[in-house]
Amino acid sequence: MTPPRRRVRRRHGGPAGQPETPVSRGPAQIRESMSAAERFEVFRRHQAFEASHRHDYAATLGFELDPFQLDAMEGVEDGDSVLVAAPTGAGKTVVGEFACDLAVSRGQRAFYTTPIKALSNQKYVDLQARFGEANVGLLTGDVSVNPGAPVVVMTTEVLRNMIYAGTDLSDLSHVVLDEVHYLADRFRGPVWEEVIIHLPSHVRVVALSATVSNAEEFGAWMREVRGSCRIVVSERRPVPLYQHMMVGSVLFDLYAPSSNGSGRLNPELVAATQAPRRPRPRGGGRWSPDEGAPARPRGRRESRPQALITLDRARLLPAIVFIFSRAGCDDAVSAVLASGIVLTSRGEADRIRSVVEEAVATIPPEDHAVLGVSRWAAGLERGIAAHHAGLLPIMKETVEKLFTRGLVKVVYATETLALGINMPARTVVIESLTKWNGAAHVQLSAGEYTQLSGRAGRRGIDSEGHAVVLHRGRVAPEEVAALASRRTYPLVSAFHPTYNMVVNLLTHSSRAATRDVLETSFAQFQADGAVVGLARQAREREREMIELESQVACELGDAREYFALRDELAAAQKTRARRRVGEGRRAAALALAEVRPGDVLAYRRGRHGNHAVALTPAQGTSDAPLVQVLGTDGRLRRLGPEDAGGGVAVVGRLAPGTDLRRVRRARDRSELADELRRLVRSGSLEEAPGRAEGGQDPHLLELERRIRSHPVHQCPERETHAVAGHAWMRARHEYERLARSVEGRTNSVAKEFDRVCEVLDLLGFLDGGEVTEAGQQLRRVFGERDLVVVEAIRSGAWDGLSGPELAAIASTVIFEARSDRDRDLEPALPGGPRGGLARAWAGTLAAQGRVSDAEARAGASPTPEVEPGLMAAVHAWASGASLSTALDAADLQGGDFVRRIRQIMDLLDQLRHIDRPGLAARARAARDLLVRGVVAWSVV
């Protein structure tokens, strides 16, 4: 590792955005008020700038560089690693492109990495325009174009894999990590830290990030692991952003025109969100197409067509409207089209049509209907589109192309657009300040709001950007102001040791050395920083305990001892209650293991009794069997011991001949649920299980006796003492909790590494510190369920499968259901219960069980369960079925299906490198079967 360089950190901001360093000024600009020494320093720096590579590079750009760009480029040229944190659209990528140019000029190479393939493809085109096609390559896992070029664009995962594979990087001088704030992403994040930690020391890192509130912390960590890091932060948006709210059809400024930066809310807006009628206009601060009209009743949402009309009349198009649901985006397009709104001229519609026809030519005609191509094209010609992951890649890219050309005027998009493609607009509209996170509706954070609104304002096109939040009868101006005024977007590490990571590291290093390396992660760096604050809080609780001790004193005896006994009794009672729950779960596990399809189950969770019909036999491990059931509410779920801790029993059966497989459609599920409810109401079922009660606990009885016999128990002031006593106990518990947290955070990543190693040891992938033959196979498989994949393969579960069967079983380790309803679908197994796919599925479940058991023994985080929901669709597609047949089997949208198929193809490519007889050929054949129709379009 190179010795630390200068610790430089520069922040840029201010409305004028004038350079804060004279490096870009000519001598004529030097103020006469400067001293001779200051004038000489300015002159010296100006001469150095004119002699620099960045000066020559800037001359080729055709626009003037901002101060933060010049400072960052200076750091790159000086040989530092650099962290650039700036708002969306500020021009961070210029710094990355400069690093590439500098490397090429010195006869070296540069890698430009991005988090997703779509961004890599976009950057590949941009850099080709800059450096020429012969000088730029592309690597995205399944695509390899000119890999030996001086500048290579790639996904970050590809670079990580190259490092682990021992690729010669001696001629690599710079790595650009674009969108480095992705390291906070739960799934992709660890890859960034792996790259930063393991890149050879001679390579300089140029990290480009959205504005984060802890850039100094991240930069300090980069200094620790890279030897140098110049931190350059710009908080100035290149295009000013103005905040608004829309109430009914009226657009209000969020802040009063005369607030002078004080952030005082617009009183007309406040009145409009409270009063029954709108005030008449008084100038400055709003625009309305129907001024003075009665306000909409509170609680009624602004209609999407009317909101669009308001934006159009206020000249605020093009706009991106963020809706946190794919269905909502599609519904918005339908509503606007139904209203008859047309946002394009005849000439624009003709230009759109030619682009659309070119794109549609790549989609097989037989797939047009299921993909809704006609409706999509009609919306585009009127300047209206949706953008979400459910669209085919070619459809999304067409929307992006037309929007950036100014032909599409409004795009209804999910929030993923804000984190991906460079697609700014004049205006951003946010329909709601709450979103569904997969488990509950949660409020947008200030960071999320900043990320979304940051898309507003096109540099070089718009003089200002606009962010609009819809009132929808419930959003208060104060809520919007609280989000708009805060710029807190902390970068929090998501790093954790994975099975694949560990075997790759241990192949080239000892266990002790690898443990030390992982302790240099940003995750541990942040944990160590948190320990300081936790230790301070622990000391405060300790002082509080000492102060309270005098108030707890009692003349009759040791009050602390007495209240400690009372606390011990309360804890023991809670432990007994938990033990009863555990016993109930074990009893439930035994009962569920015997369940047969068609059994009617009565089970109790907490105080509530429920009935359900079993659709499958128990799956999973013996300790945690899972039974697929349909409840009386018509919902599918997996019933496990934790769901039936209060008791579970078979109380009857459905009528013989009942078709239990008719659960794929909502109507069929409803009919089966009706049949179940009739059976429950009939009174013919056995009695539901009651709550089991245990006998007296001797330990509890002894504690109660000691408390009653304690001298303090007889004190007439006992309950007065109790106030201070309970406060003392709370302080003690908090102190102990904080002390445990300090201990837990110390070496936390290394401890997790130890648990991962124990799992690998238990399963035979490691032998102490040595990577076994099975571990060498694991090195080639990347993914959340990497261990399950290799465990299933080495057990023979995937042997002898046909191409469609191998592709189908591979889908179980990459598929993640979007909802519990999807996850609960009974797997359809082509070939029947005795076919090859059924055998492979059973073997994969067994492999999952072995992995889960080892993780439980080691105390490691559990691997997500394999999911069968995509098997039938993938098997159909690989067997030559139409897209509509495949989508119907999976209940997926076209874009989701293509993305999942591409992930399966990635996994099949990985399997080709596993040493298993016949596997490579079968994986290649399975992959080839998938590459057709809409999937083939994006495969190079």
Image (cartoon, helix red, strand yellow):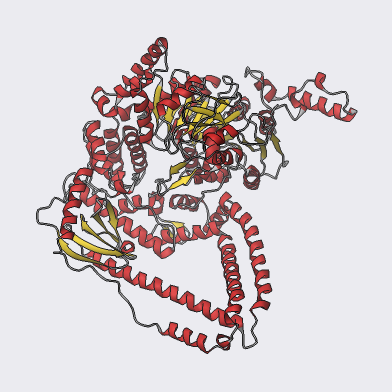
* Image quadrant occupied by the C terminus: top left
Residue 426, relative to residue 557: is it above or below?
above
Residue 120 place in picture, x, y as percent: 47, 30
Residue at the image position 68 percent from the left and 36 percent from the top: 262
Residue at the image position 64 percent from the left and 43 percent from the top: 219
Q: Residue furthest left?
A: 656
Q: Is residue 314 left or right of residue 357?
A: right
* Viewer-nearest residue: 15 or 898: 15
Q: Quadrant of residue 604?
A: bottom left
Residue 246 place in picture, x, y as percent: 50, 31
Report the label total: 0
* Viewer-nearest residue: 767 or 544: 544
Residue 464 place in picture, x, y as percent: 59, 24
Q: Residue furthest right?
A: 36
Q: Residue furthest top?
A: 347
Residue 625, relative to residue 202: is it above or below?
below
Q: Quadrant of residue 387?
A: top left
Can residue 48 be seen from the camera position used here? yes
Q: Is residue 293 left or right of residue 934?
A: right
Residue at the image position 62 percent from the left and 59 percent from the top: 531
* Viewer-nearest residue: 683 or 121: 683
Residue 73, relative to residue 846: is it above or below?
above
Residue 161 place in picture, x, y as percent: 47, 42
Can residue 173 be seen from the camera position used here? no
Residue at the image position 57 percent from the left and 46 percent from the top: 197
* Viewer-nearest residue: 54 or 686: 686
